[in-house]
Amino acid sequence: MSTTGTTTAVRRTPAARPGTGLARLLRENPALRIDQDDYNINVTANYGERLSEDEVAEALRTHPGADRPAHLYFHVPLCAYVCHFCNYVKRKVPDGAEGARAPRVWTDLLLDESVRRLAHAPWLRRASIESVYLGGGTASLLGTEQLARLVVHLREHYQLGDDCEISLEGNPDNFLGDELAEACALGFNRFSVGVQSLQSEVNAFAGRGHDAVMSLRAIEKLRATGKPYNVDMMFGLPQQTTATVADDIRRLIDLGVPTITVYRLRNADRAGMGIGNRAVWNVPSVKSRLDAQYAFPSVGETYAMREAVVELLLDAGYHPSPCGWWNRPGTYPDGNIPRVSRNKWQRHDTMIAFGPGAYGWLTRDDDTVVQTHNTADITGYARRMKAGPGLPLAPGRRLTGHQALGMVLGFAFKANQPIRAERFRRRFGVEIFHDEPFASVFAELAERGFMAPVPGEPEAVVPTLDGEALHEEIISVYFHQRIGDFAEAVCRR
């Protein structure tokens, strides 16, 4: 295939391994160098026709989703503490009686929203639910009693497959007792734990409520379940060094953690963008003080941390699938990718999301994608749910043609699985390796060493390890901007 034929000619430093040499990659690709305060890469699209709440509700009602695969996401906006870097939709659980009631209150709200959506869009009862994810916030703060109510509701009202993947997200301090064993008994079969760092001083500086001892104890509890799980780790945090970040990953590898997810600190002001909460580190006075103290690592130091991590993961036999999620061989079937990632990103199945600030999308066999959003105001969400009937929606977006293609290709790149021309020919009626603007984008990604042919498949490409290293930047620049903002209609249907 001509679009990938230049891959072998990419210049490389002799000692560089694929996925490392990030300083060189950033020098050769300055458009992908995004500084810490601007780093907030979304895989969802910020373009397309804006839809009113009523239009989103109508799209939900009439969506032809019966008998088609779908993913369910429940957003629990509760946290025992608020991390200084967190700019997602969440709030600290209040003290006293109000805090004790919070898990039941929020479970009631999530169940109520689910009941309303089922009544509004009856096709949901017939959708084939292949994966469910409870995140947040800190979903595990709901506790066993409320989690049981959610699972019972899911099994009674949705068509969950016999092998449906049901994931629960939490922090180490939530997994120190019998919580995991009880969750397994309820039917949870995959877990995610936010460790971020095994350096206690790093987590203390970030305002997290656990130390290294608690994290390691939680990992032992996770291992004992025999279920797959991922440990989330961050790089680019204050107090981190390349050596300490590498030491963290080395310890996780030695423990046999099946999936190690590595994330760069996102320090953009999402509240200012209208898509989240303001993090403590985004408050101007706090940010000025931290900048004066040179608290944040530079971009170069940040990527040096990632290079050290990748070297260790590669040597230990891990491979990223999706990008940023490094799995031991054989952790998952069918491409060694979790089903939540296969549904959301690789196949881009319909995703129905519940809770404040939750976003989802409706996909079908044409060139249209509808992005759905719930109101991100936590108090406003609860007030609207208690005020009367209706869904707690915010305005959404309709993407068609090149806009939808840019989004779907971005998700496909994120999945780090083969991107096959046949899929886009069948759904969109385009030839992604020959029609513009796709052909130019794929040719440039190949020339720069970010994509490579799939052996034995003349019409398929896959991200390289260099592409994986800068996947979020590539999605933003190449797929959302170059394709999603393309000025001409491209679909021939």
Image: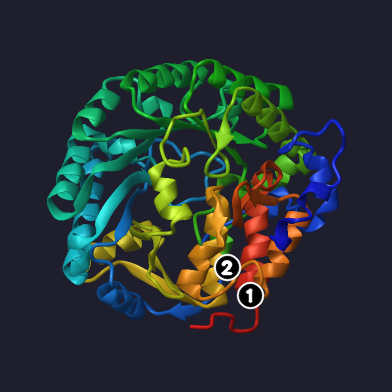
> Callout 2: helix, strand or loop?
helix
Q: Is residue 100 left or right of residue 76?
A: left
- Which residue is rendered at x = 53% and y = 41% of the image? 321
Image location of residue 425, percent across then percent down: 51, 70
Protein image colouring: rainbow
- Which residue is rendered at x = 28% and y = 59% of the image? 382
> Callout 1: helix, strand or loop?
loop
Q: Are marks 1 and 2 in contact (CB under 8 Å)?
A: yes
Between 280 and 304, the residue placed more toward the observer is 304
Q: Report the quarter where the N terminus lies.
A: bottom right
Q: Amino acid at mark 2?
A: Gly
Q: Choose the circle earlier in sequence order: 1 or 2.
A: 2
Image-quadrant location for residue 433: bottom right
Image location of residue 485, percent across then percent down: 63, 75
Q: Amino acid at mark 1?
A: Asp
Q: Is residue 239 above or below residue 50?
A: above
Classify 10 Å Cα crowding around label 1: few (below 14), some (14-19), many (20 and above).
some
Q: Which residue is mark 2?
A: 406
Between the residue at mark 1 and the residue at mark 2, the CA separation in whole angstroms equals 8 Å
Image location of residue 458, percent across then percent down: 62, 56
Between 321 and 211, the residue placed more toward the observer is 321
Q: Is residue 100 left or right of residue 394?
A: left
- Which residue is rendered at x = 22% and y = 63% of the image? 124
Q: Is residue 436 visible?
A: yes
Image location of residue 24, percent across then percent down: 84, 43
Q: Which residue is mark 1?
A: 485
